[in-house]
Amino acid sequence: MSGGMREIKRRIKSVGSTRQITKAMNLVASSKLNKAKDRFLKIRPFAEMTRSVISSVASGAQNLNHPYISSREVKKATVIVLAGDRGLCGGYNSGVCQSALSLSSQVECDYITVGAKAFEYFKSRGKSISRSVRGISEKPEYSDARIIGEEVLKRFAEGQTDEVYLAYTMYHSTISYESTVVRLLPFDMEEFSSDEAEGAAIYEPSADEVLSYVLPKYINTVIYGAMAESALCEQSARMTAMDSATENADDMMETLNTKYNRARQGAITQEITEIIAGAEC
């Protein structure tokens, strides 16, 4: 076997090994995708019920005076960034990080990163990271969201930050998702007063007291829901990326096999020619 054919054979084996890995990762991501979707769908009812209570308060209360809804001059913002702990998922990680980074052109920002890739992205750019959470991106728990929620609520109430944003990836379908940034604090009560509440209610001891209890729960739920949605998008992105990589490996192996067969045919033809030439001498 000539050196060229030997090199082609080695490349075919290498690509075949890579294809086995990408195929296996595609199957694993597909399995995790179904579990992530179930987790995400289970969160919706609680979030919708909490939103309904807030809508009712917003519709029936007048002149609310609560620290979580008070706007002030924005000097510093905190951005919670939800990315993955692992790569090999296309542009999923870079997309949400770029969306979060765009806020720094408008106001001074510090970042709370969830996922090793988010931490690496902002650290490499010299950005201020006040908290880093790793190892939970694929299977977040409500307790993880509550810790982050309590921290940003405390910092906002104490004036350490003037706005809080959440950067995550919104799920549309298995092949469609987009990074987005939403403002968590100060709370926009007008958004909720426009919702169709069942009817304004009178709350005791006061609407402010109700908000003090409900708003933190809602913030935690929004963060947890975004974590679950981002986990769903991460698996979707990884499944798509690995499927594409497997198809590329198939195409490459087909090309290499064709090239190998042609080289082998050429080598055989050359050997026959040499035998005939030798016989004629």
Image: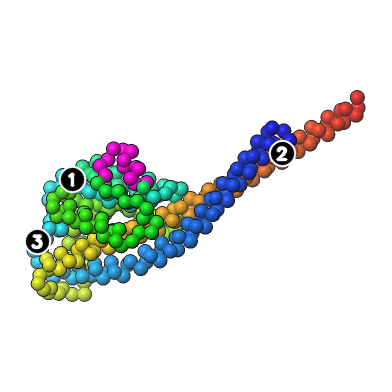
From this viewpoint, which residue is outermost toward the top?
281
| Residue 224 shown left or right of residue 252 in the figure | left
Pinpoint residue 57: horizontal percent, then vertical percent: 16, 69
Q: CA distance from mark 1 to mark 3?
A: 22 Å
**Residue position for label 1:** 76
**Residue position for label 3:** 65
| Residue 79 shown left or right of residue 257 in the figure | left
Residue at figure coordinates x 20%, y 70% from the top left = 53
Q: How is the image coloured?
A: rainbow
Residue 128 among those drawn in magenta: yes
Q: Amino acid at mark 3?
A: Asn
Residue at figure coordinates x 72%, y 33% from the top left = 2
Q: Amino acid at mark 1?
A: Lys
Residue at figure coordinates x 90%, y 29% from the top left = 279
Quadrant position of the N terminus in the picture: top right
Secondary structure character of the magenta stretch overall? helix
Q: Crowdedness of circle 1 by 10 Å Cα count: few (<14), some, many (20+)? A: some
Pinpoint residue 246: horizontal percent, then vertical percent: 55, 50
Segment tinted magenta in the rendering = 117-129
Tell me how many marks there are.
3
Pinpoint residue 98: horizontal percent, then vertical percent: 33, 44
**Residue position for label 2:** 262
Q: Amino acid at mark 2?
A: Arg
Q: Is residue 33 above or below residue 13?
A: below
Q: Crowdedness of circle 2 by 10 Å Cα count: few (<14), some, many (20+)? A: few
